[in-house]
Amino acid sequence: MTRARGLLWIASTTLRADRRGTILDAAAACVGAAALVFFLALGLGVSRAAQRMFPADARLVEIVPGSVALGGVLGGGKLDDDAVARVGRLPGAAAVWPRVSLRVPMAAPGPPKGLDYNWPPGMTVQLPVMGVAPELVKADVGEALSFEDPGTADRPIPVLLSRRLLEIYNKTLAPAWGVRRLPTGVSIVGLELPVKVGRSIVPQKTEDHVYDARLKLVGLSDRVPIYMVAMPLATVRRLHAEYGKAEQGYTQVTVLARRPEDVPALTAAVRRMGLSVDEGERATAERVGTVVLVTTGALVFLAAIMCGLAALAIAQSLSASVRARAKEIAVLGALGAAPADVRRIVLAEGAIVGLGGGAVGAALALGAAVLADRAAVSLLPDFPFRPETFFAFPPWLPALGVVVPVLAAVLGALAPAAAAARVDPARTLS
Amino acid sequence: MIRLRGVTKSFHDADREVPILRGVDLDVAQGELVAIVGPSGSGKSTLLYVAGALDRDFGGEAVVDGVRLAGLSAESRADLRNRAVGFVFQSFNLLSGLSAVENVMLPGVLRRDGREAKAAIRDRAEQALAGVGLADKARQPPARLSGGERQRVAIARALFARPKVLLADEPTGNLDAVTGEGIIRQFAELARGGLTVLVVTHEERVSRAASRVLHLSEGVLR
């Protein structure tokens, strides 16, 4: 039996002898651990849900033409190829992807093939289309599928939709229309939607020439605006040429910063060029993120106070125990325990109490999270982006739930341990 | 085995210093059973704790089992107490939350070289209890044992580490006559077996069993 194990054995048998006191101390550590794990898991879970709802990439900057009319008159603030090239040369810019809105109307008079049940009878949907650089959405294109301009009308045009649109369709549109929900995930990739190019639901805006085409869904992406269909930039240019629409520059340009820290300088440089930065989505995401962070921080702070109170409770309890056990501590000294051993025994008592309380607390937090999720399922409506769980339990979290109470308990045991080490066996036994 | 030369010890009482031991010289050889008698407050227990490396604030020279105590670190003194010294107290001083066998295991658990497995320590502790006739009480807490049984558990604990020296402070003070006689006989047997036994007592019957009786009075040993 090593010395450390021997001291641990003495600590555990001492705690066992005072079951009631040990359970009370462990309960204090348990409450602190449970609160810490529960609130942190809630904060992480809600943060994850918020990121799903507002998937802002910290490195992306959305540039739109300058809003000051004078700049436009003088040639500044226009998003043309020259401006895109200049933006691409800015320090901190890793890539630049222009976007153009399709100015040729396009409408879907019927459902995608095989999804008749998901379409209200007789409904025609006007499709807002944005042409995007293929590199912008490269990572989101399905396997063995291509996001390139097909060149001719008889081949389907590849398109991408916002991942969030599917969620909104399933949770809001489908129930409102009384139609079936679409399967989530990539299982709808590959669907083809018949469309009429040149047709608008506003009769005056319908072009003279209308022809049939097909759109093929090749992927879902967070980089596609939520209520738009994204098709290759080259396709939009081809359609503009077909219908004699003059080039008007780009609608929007997405810049990828090398690092998130480069974004402020990049934004400032873009503004100096007379261009504007669309911070709507980013600002919303940042606001939501800040609210979640502040709320989680406040709750974790509360949990930290609980752990601190647990440490104080353990300190008080162990101090009383050391005073009551002075003679027994002196006997341990007579049997061969040095002051350092006595100190370690009391610290081990604190650690054991923290460990037990922390482990039970972490388990309780896990159970409480399961119950809270069940309650949410039965009490909350099925709104868009409602997460499966409001909690996230990364592997380090339960470990933290045990380590923090152990540290708090050991901290609480420091003063009693020092007092125990000061017990003079000769004087105490006399 | 025990050698004290000019040992002095005093306590501070308010602003004055109260001498307890005034230059005590003592030699106890291996296998000797020496009794120290004296009135209450004469410094008998203090002398015992100096000889047992439990008290460090004393003057003079003390050597136990060949180890000079002066200047010894707290760790080394604790190690010496664990290996070479066994204590038996008047009020038994068993740890109330531990069973009889767990009390006996303590010196083994506190051993610094720590080579013996816990199961082996427990086996030896049970044998030690059997040796003092308490095999059937091993799992009992001290509160369920009689005074004599508690003292026998304390003796088993003191002898567990096979010490060279046994120091007993009024070992029969809380026992009835018959039980006390049994304990004294056991000490005499241990001394005959080679153990050095130093007993502090004020009881005649203990003195009668001792090979030497020394009187401590006003801090001086005679």
Image (cartoon, rainbow, N blue to C red):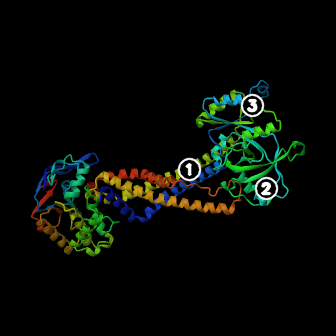
Q: Earlier in the sequence, mark 1 or mark 3?
A: 3
Residue at numbered disc 2: A111
Q: Are marks 2 and 3 on the same chain?
A: yes
Q: Earlier in the sequence, mark 2 or mark 1?
A: 2
Q: Position of residue B61 (x, y in %)?
A: 15, 48
Left or right: residue A179 compared with residue A327: right
Identify the mark at residue A66; answer none if there is no mark.
Answer: 3
In the figure, residue B33 lies in which quadrant? Answer: bottom left
Residue at numbered disc 1: A300
State the residue at coordinates (41%, 55%): A351
Identify the mark at residue B60; answer none if there is no mark.
Answer: none
Of B198 and B161, which appears nearest the observer? B161
Of A85 and A423, which appears nearest the observer? A85
Q: Amino acid at mark 3?
A: Gly
Task: Spot the residue most to the right.
Answer: A204
Mark 2–mark 3 distance (CA, rounded to whole Å):
39 Å
